Amino acid sequence: MADFYRLLRPLAFALEPEVAHHAALGAARIAERFGIKPFAYTVKTRPVRVMGLDFPSPVGLAAGLDKNGEYIDALAALGFGFIEIGTITPRPQSGNPKPRLFRLPEAEAIINRMGFNNHGVDALIANVKRARYRGILGINIGKNFDTPIEKAVDDYLYCLRRVYPYASYITVNISSPNTANLRQLQSEAMIGGLLERLKEEQRRLIDTHQRYVPLAVKIAPDMTDEQIVVISEAFLQYKVDAVIATNTTISRQGVENLADADQQGGLSGAPLMQRSTEVVRQLHRILGEEVPIIAAGGIMSGADALAKINAGAKLVQLYTGLIYRGPKLINDIYKVLCGVH
């Protein structure tokens, strides 16, 4: 299986990154529909209970790969324990001008400035309804680029209400570097008000739907130690159900002088591993077992995933590692987490 992906990767990397992205997902969808499983692995890991949900395994797909929920069944066939789709916004938007996605293969990294390009929340819901997948599905929500930051909560509330009946959990994305001012929502001045409104709405939706859907918050890796303390205290105060650490970074440490390293946007992949894991460790020191941590950022091997778990994470998510290492990475992580050699 590994040889098969190594054969395909140079062909995909010969294409412009965004073209390759859609081509690969389209091919995966066709393969799944015809029952072709070139990356089918059988190794499984023990289930884990997080946010009151029973995950069949702790290895999931991070948001961003399937923004509109168009490829849920194809991605689930790769062996993930859970899938997160989005980021979705209330209204469709085209995102930032192209080119906006750049590979840095020497560092196994990607820079993106996509800008929450998506078809809008209603299109995502229609795709979720069509999917056959019945596993754990996270839906990642954001704000439209032209919504003033002072009114951002209205966009999050709108998306929360719309996706609540269809999600296993909902992620509030306040950490993308590619929507102007979005990261201000992580500040001490704004985070409390945002979380208070979201948790109030969650309580109303529980009564309406007779079902509890957990709320996770996705944070940036670029916060100072003091900012991490502040936001952690807010998570505890407002009883957030989980924190996802982390989104992409605006740092260029580890990719200096590489081609396209000066492109604007968020950096993901191997160079993010150390900093993202340190954020997980800092969060766990404050949150303990009260707010579970989902780790994302730079996971390129089973050892990387284990490092996240050892730092305090309950679950891990993949994105850039999947691009560089292929679906075999999922199986490699399962083996390490299960102690299979």
Image: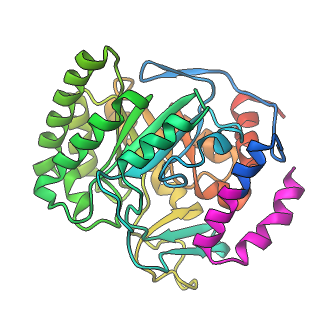
Colour scheme of the rendered structure: rainbow
Name the quadrant containing residue 97: bottom left
User: How many numbered tags mark residues here?
Assistant: 0
Residue 2 falls within the magenta-colored stretch? yes
Residue 22 falls within the magenta-colored stretch? yes
Q: Is residue 267 above or below residue 190?
A: below
Specify whether 80 is left or right of 273.
right
Specify whether 106 is left or right of 164.
right
Q: Which residues are magenta?
A: 1-26
Pick the front one: 70 or 307? 70
Question: Main SS of the magenta segment?
Answer: helix
Whether residue 279 appears in this view of the structure is no
Q: Is residue 252 above or below residue 42?
A: below
On-image quarter of the C terminus: top right
Specify whether 10 is left or right of 17.
right
Name the quadrant containing residue 9: bottom right
Q: Residue 93: x and y, percent? A: 35, 64
Identify the residue at horizontal 67%, vertical 21% (top origin).
46
Q: Residue 178: x and y, percent? A: 35, 67
Identify the residue at horizontal 63%, vertical 78% (top origin).
16
Name the quadrant containing residue 284: top left
Whether residue 46 appears in this view of the structure is yes
Q: Residue 203: x and y, percent? A: 21, 22
Identify the residue at horizontal 39%, vertical 68% (top origin).
94
Q: Residue 70: x and y, percent? A: 55, 49
Identify the residue at horizontal 78%, vertical 48% (top origin).
31
